[in-house]
Image (tube, rainbow, N blue to C red):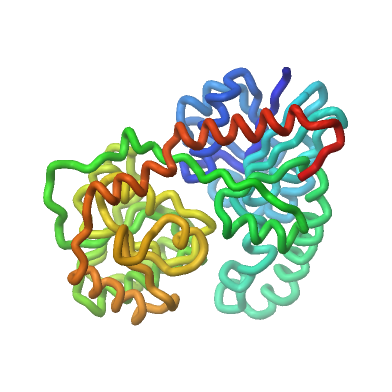
């Protein structure tokens, strides 16, 4: 059986790439097709595969400004030649699910989210305060509206959708009018373990620096409390966030897995201030025995139990988050409970669930969709 794997872009090891890594283990001979790939940016498990990139890889400034080519993503993803494939597995949060599979092939899409910026987060990325009123209305809005139409129109190319959470399954139902099987993303609970160290006084954020993560809320909340904050990650919002930060905020930049584990183990708690489709960071933190303070929306409702494995706050505001951080003083968190919560999302659980979904899809009669 010839298998093709399709992923939006390979520029770092985030949650989507960790899903792809597990699938690569299930199908070690499969080719990977992706819009962009920078050698060394993802794990050796992924890079052992033959990786095909799109023509966009060779465009000017592609390495540093690849998101500027967003209007061309649908055309580029449709150019991949998957002839001869029996099974296509796409890992998609943008355009990968729109790949054109051969007629006889089954297409399973692990959907991290329908396009956020095309559907319900346009203002966070392309609102007037970010790109200017004229560009927002007359340039980006028509482009994103066209992308949304393409995104909906190509949903039929997928035989079976797999969602990373109940929250994303609801979005798939809303925007694609399709049902989805839920398989939670994998977390390496063997690697992420508690350490025999006492937590320090600071809070920790592990995140890409993009608008919907709402990192500015956490910066403001910690400033109100006079609490030190450490932030691991990078992204296009870095300069803006640094300008609004005081001396108690430390920007760590991208970290290795070993460095990140140490940060989890030493933090008082990990903060997730934005709405996540699932959010692997809270589970990694719990695997290290640390509680999570998260916005009570999206995937956090499936990974964080208020008062047990963390604290949930209702409003996406610095005031609401600051109140939640104060509540931390009144709760005694149990490391064993935190570990047990994280084990629900282990790599082994994910791999078995994905293999079952794929096998069931292949065994179904030709033409079956879910």
The quarter of the picture where residue 243 lies is bottom left
Picture quarter with the C terminus: top right
Residue 124 in percent (x, y) is at: 56, 70
At a point 70% along the width and 48% down the height, the residue shown is: 95
In the rendered view, would you say 42 is above or below 302?
Answer: above
At a point 46% along the width and 63% down the height, the residue shown is: 213
The quarter of the picture where residue 226 lies is bottom left
Residue 311 visible to an observer of this rendering = yes
Residue 68 in percent (x, y) is at: 64, 55
Residue 246 in percent (x, y) is at: 25, 71
Picture quarter with the N terminus: top right
At a point 79% along the width and 37% down the height, the residue shown is: 79
Q: Nearer the viewer, residue 99 or 34?
A: 99
Q: How many numbered discs sit on the rendered protein?
A: 0
In the rendered view, would you say 318 is above or below 115?
Answer: below
Q: Nearer the viewer, residue 327 or 218?
A: 327
């Amino acid at each position: 059986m010839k298998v093709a794997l399709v992923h939006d872009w390979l520029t770092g090891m985030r949650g989507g790439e960790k899903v792809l890594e597990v699938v690569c283990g299930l199908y070690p001979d499969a080719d990977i097709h992706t819009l962009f790939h920078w050698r060394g940016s993802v794990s050796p498990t992924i890079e052992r595969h033959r990786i095909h990139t799109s023509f966009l890889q060779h465009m000017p400034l592609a390495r540093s400004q690849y998101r500027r080519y967003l209007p061309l993503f649908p055309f580029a993803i449709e150019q991949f030649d998957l002839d001869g494939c029996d099974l296509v597995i796409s890992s998609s949060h943008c355009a990968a699910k729109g790949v054109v599979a051969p007629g006889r092939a089954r297409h399973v899409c692990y959907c991290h989210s329908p396009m956020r910026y095309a559907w319900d987060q346009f203002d966070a990325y392309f609102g007037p305060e970010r790109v200017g009123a004229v560009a927002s209305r007359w340039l980006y809005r028509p482009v994103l509206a066209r992308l949304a139409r393409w995104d909906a129109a190509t949903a039929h190319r997928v035989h079976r959708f797999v969602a990373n959470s109940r929250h994303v399954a609801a979005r798939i139902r809303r925007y694609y009018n399709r049902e989805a099987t839920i398989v939670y993303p994998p977390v390496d609970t063997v690697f992420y373990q508690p350490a025999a160290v006492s937590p320090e006084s600071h809070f920790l954020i592990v995140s890409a620096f993009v608008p919907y993560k709402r990192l500015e809320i956490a910066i403001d909340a910690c400033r109100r409390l006079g609490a030190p904050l450490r932030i691991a990650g990078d992204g296009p919002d870095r300069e803006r966030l640094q300008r609004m930060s005081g001396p108690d905020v430390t920007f760590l930049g991208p970290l290795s897995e070993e460095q990140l584990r140490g940060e989890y183990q030493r933090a008082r708690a990990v903060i997730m201030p934005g709405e996540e489709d699932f959010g692997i960071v809270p589970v990694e933190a719990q695997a290290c025995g640390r509680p999570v303070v998260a916005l009570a929306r999206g995937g956090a409702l499936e990974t964080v139990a208020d008062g047990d494995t963390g604290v949930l706050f209702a409003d996406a505001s610095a005031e609401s988050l600051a109140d939640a951080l104060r509540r931390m003083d009144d709760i005694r968190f149990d490391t064993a409970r935190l570990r047990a919560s994280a084990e629900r999302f282990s790599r082994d659980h994910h791999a078995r669930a994905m293999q079952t979904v794929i096998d069931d899809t292949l065994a179904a009669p030709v033409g079956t969709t879910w």
